[in-house]
Amino acid sequence: MSRSIPGFKKTQGVAYVPSLNKVFVASGDDGMLRVFRGDTLDLLDAIKLDLGPNRVAYDSHAELLYVGYGGKDAGKDYGQVGVIDAKTDKHVADIKVAAHPAELLLNRSGKILFVFVSAASKVQVVDTNKRAVASS
């Protein structure tokens, strides 16, 4: 059975977390990360970020979701990676990066997040424990 969730103008990143029965959807047009119940697609929560949320990466070890946003979409000369507690749907931190994140890739251990920042022609390496860029 296939179903859809109406009302999005610029759906970007989607993450399904079976262990929490949640679907996280980043909406680039309004700066929101919406959380839906996985089995019914009922809206559970909406988390306000800055403009341009796009890519999402889920760390199953720490039960954290990383969401890229900011940059020119938000009128800023830098980008951000929001850290979301997937259990409570709370925005717990931000990691500043060079520009709007074009892609996020989390290593298997969840300790390193690679952030592709195309506007700055960089790949930034984030230490997820320190929640800071370790190298570019």
Image: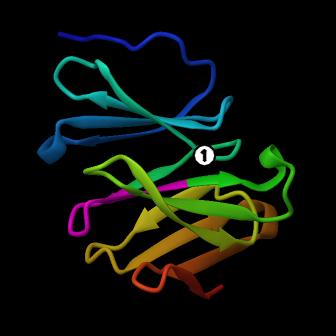
Question: What residue does disc 1 label?
Answer: 49
Q: Secondary structure at mark 1?
A: loop
- Decide if residue 22 is on the left or right side of residue 46: left
Figure check: 75 above or below 122: above
Is most of the magenta stretch helix, strand or loop?
Answer: strand
* Residue 5 in the image, given as x and y percentages of width and height: 40, 14
Q: Which residues are magenta?
A: 58-67
Above/below status of 84 relative to 4 = below
For label 1, the crowd category at 10 Å Cα-Cα, with few meaning under 14, some 14 to 19 and many 20 or more, is many
At horizontal 68% and vertical 71% (from top left) the residue drawn is 97
Q: Nearer the viewer, residue 63 or 118?
A: 63
Quarter of the picture containing the N terminus is: top left
Q: Nearer the viewer, residue 34 or 2?
A: 34
Q: Give the residue drawn at x 53%, y 49%.
A: 55
Residue at (35%, 80%) from the top-left corner? 111
Horizontal relation, residue 26 to residue 51: left or right: left
Q: How is the image coloured?
A: rainbow
Quadrant assignment for the C terminus: bottom right
Q: Is residue 104 magenta?
A: no
Q: Where 48 falls versus 123 (above or below)?
A: above
The part of the image, by quadrant, that contains residue 121 is bottom right
Q: Where in the figure is residue 130, as x and y percent of width and height?
A: 47, 86
Amino acid type, residue under disc 1 in the picture = Leu
Return the residue found at the far left: 19
